[in-house]
Amino acid sequence: MELGSGIFVIVLLVLFLVIVFQAIRVVPQGFNFTVERFGRYTKTLDPGLSILVPFIDRVGARMNMMEQVLNVPSQEVITRDNAMVTVDGVAFYQVLDAAKASYEVNDLELAVVNLTMTNTRTVMGGMDLDELLSQRDEINARLLHVVDQATSPWGIKLTRIEIKDINPPRDLVDSMARQMKAEREKRASILEAEGLRQAEILQADGEKQAQILAAEGRKEAAFRDAEAREREAEAEAKATAMVSEAIASGNIHAINYFVATKYVEALGSLASSRNQKVLMLPVEATSLIGSIGGIAEIAREAFGNGTTGRDDDSGAAVPSVGPQQ
C-alpha cells in the first residue's frame, strides 16, 4: 500500500512539472511568439515571462522582430535603350506584426527577395543606361517605395533597398570609355578656343582703349596748340595795334622798332631754311645797326630813361647807335 502511494505521488509530481513546463514560456528580447489554441491564432507573446494553458495553447511561430538583411541575387536587366546589365542588391526589413508575418505569407524571406528582384527589373527596365549609372539614389528610392507598399499587408516594413553593383558588358564599357574620352577632348578644345577668343577680345579692347587715349591726347594737344596760336595772334594783333598807334602819332622810334623786328624775322627765316646754303644780303649793315639802335631807344623810353645820353648809375654819356644822318 505504501509503495503504491509513493508511485502515485511521483506520477503527480512529474505531471505537475510537465504542466508547469507547458504553461510557462520565456520570450527572449527581440522576438515575439504567436500563440495557437487548437490550431487557431489567439495572441502574441512579447519578450518576458508568459503563462499558457497547458495542453490547449501552444507556441505557433517564433518571429525575429529585429531589422534583418536579405541579399538580392544578381540578375540580368535589359534597359530601355536595349543595353543588358547585371545588377544585384541588398534589402533591409523589420517585422512589425508577428501575426501577419506568420500567417499572411508563406516563407517571408523568399517572398521579399522575389518581390524585390521583380520590381528591380521593372524600375531599371524603364530607364536608359546612362540614367542607371548616374541616378542610383533615384532607383533605390523608387524600389523602396514600390516594394514597401507591396509588403505592408505582411506586417513588415522595408527600411532600405540598395543596388550594390551595376555591371554592363565589357564591350559596352569600352565604348563608354571611348565616348567619355572624346567628350573630354571636345570640352578641352572648346575651352581652349574660348580662351583664345577671350584673349583676342581683351587684346582688341586694349588696342581700342590705347587708340582712344591717343586720340584724346592728340585732341588735347591740338586744342592747346590752337589756344597758343590764338593767344599769339592776340598778342601780335595787340602789338600791331600799338605800333600803328605809335606810327600814327609820329613816333620815329616805333617805326624803327617795327621795321627792325620784321627785318630780323625775315633774316632768321632765310637762315633756318634747309635748302638755303648761301645767304645773300642785299642790305647794308649800317641800316640794320641803325634799326637795332632804334629798338634800344624805345627800350630806354619804356623804362623811364627820358635822356638817351646818360647811364642810370654813373651818369656817364652813352653814345648813340642810331643811323647817321
Image (cartoon, rainbow, N blue to C red):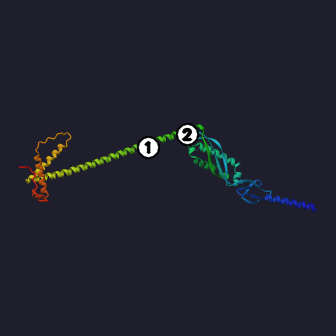
Image position, residue 139 (x, y; %): 59, 47
Q: Eyeballing the image, is 112 above or below 313?
A: above
| Numbered disc 2: secondary structure | helix
Q: Eyeballing the image, is 234 above or below 278?
A: below
Q: Residues within 10 Å of mark 1 (few under 14, many from 20)?
A: few
Q: CA distance from mark 1 to mark 2?
A: 27 Å
Image position, residue 201 (x, y; %): 39, 44
**Residue at coordinates 27% horizontally, 48% vertically from top-left?**
219
Would you identify the image quadrant in which residue 317 lies? bottom left
| Numbered disc 1: secondary structure | helix
The amino acid pointed to by label 2 is: Ala
Residue assigned mark 1: 195
Looking at the image, residue 209 sits to the left or right of residue 63; the answer is left
Looking at the image, residue 202 sits to the left or right of residue 119; the answer is left
For marks 1 and 2, the one nearer the N-term is 2
Residue 176 is tagged as: none
Residue assigned mark 2: 177
Q: Residue at the top extreme?
A: 171
The amino acid pointed to by label 1 is: Gly
